[in-house]
Image (cartoon, rainbow, N blue to C red):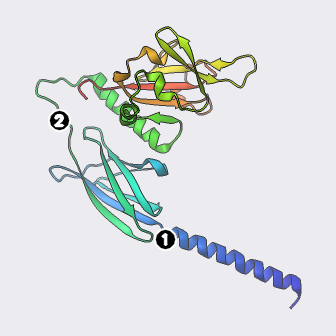
Amino acid sequence: MPRPLLSRIMLGSVGAALVAASTAAAQERGTLSGVVRDSAGAPVRDADIGVVALRMLTKTDGDGRFKLAKLPEGEVIVSIRRIGFEPTTLRRAVAPGIADSVSVEMARITVLEGMVVSERALRQRFWIEDFYRGRTRGVGTYLTREEIEHKRAWRPSELLRQTPGLRFVRVRGGQGVRFMSSSSMRRDCMPMVWIDGQQAPGMELDDLPLSTIEGLELYHGPSTTPIQFSQGSMTTCGTIVVWSRIPGT
């Protein structure tokens, strides 16, 4: 057999083997499906089902069912969130080639008798759910309320102390967060701060009480900043987005 033809046959065999191995590996990933119900047994539709570590996000259907496919082997942490319900977390071990099924019960958020739920509080709940969806998708740096409490910081700027690309300057009332600029004309760049969907020009992060923060988003430049936080903003620096806690939570 001519040598060039033999080489082509061998290369073809190697390529086919690699494709087969890749296909087998994909088939060996696990699947997690389930149903989400409330405490009365009724299905919960449109609940966000997310795996932050894998940047996976889906929703429950009208029957409260969901499916997460192509999960790698090992433990996954699944977040289940829906407006009007207490968020919950599910830990599950995924085995290759196995389709697992779970049942999740969500507790409704109770409103104390006489407490008035304002329109602003409702808007905040929608904003906070968007915050958690964005965190799952993975664009930007996110700090959740749980992570903020775990850091035991004493002012908001301390939450970002270990974040690359930032420096801190002394300002009245605390520290100013600055993005490092690539321009030789500027050593630092002041971010645009947004609070609950509204621009706050000139505001420093430490102007806010740490105890009032539910979540925080950070984007290092205009190219990574979501359009809703760049419209009408003239800054060429990064953006810090702050979401406030809902009173009573």
Count up the numbered dots: 2
Residue linked to disc 2: 110
Please give the name of the residue rendered at 51% of the width and 25% of the height, measured from the top-left corner. 240
> In which quadrant of the rendered image does the N terminus lie?
bottom right
> In which quadrant of the rendered image does the C terminus lie?
top left
Please give the name of the residue rendered at 52% of the width and 28% of the height, measured from the top-left corner. 161
Q: Nearer the viewer, residue 96 or 27?
A: 96
User: CA gap, disc 1 to disc 2?
Assistant: 42 Å
Look at the picture and state if 26 lies above or below 204.
Answer: below
Answer with mark 1 or mark 2, whichever residue precedes in sequence. Answer: 1
Residue linked to disc 1: 28
Residue 84 picture location, percent across and down: 25, 38
Q: Nearer the viewer, residue 155 or 47?
A: 155
Q: Is residue 32 left or right of residue 53?
A: left
Q: Is residue 80 left or right of residue 29?
A: left
Please give the name of the residue rendered at 76% of the width and 77% of the height, measured from the top-left corner. 11
Residue 69 picture location, percent across and down: 44, 61
Mark seen at residue 10: none
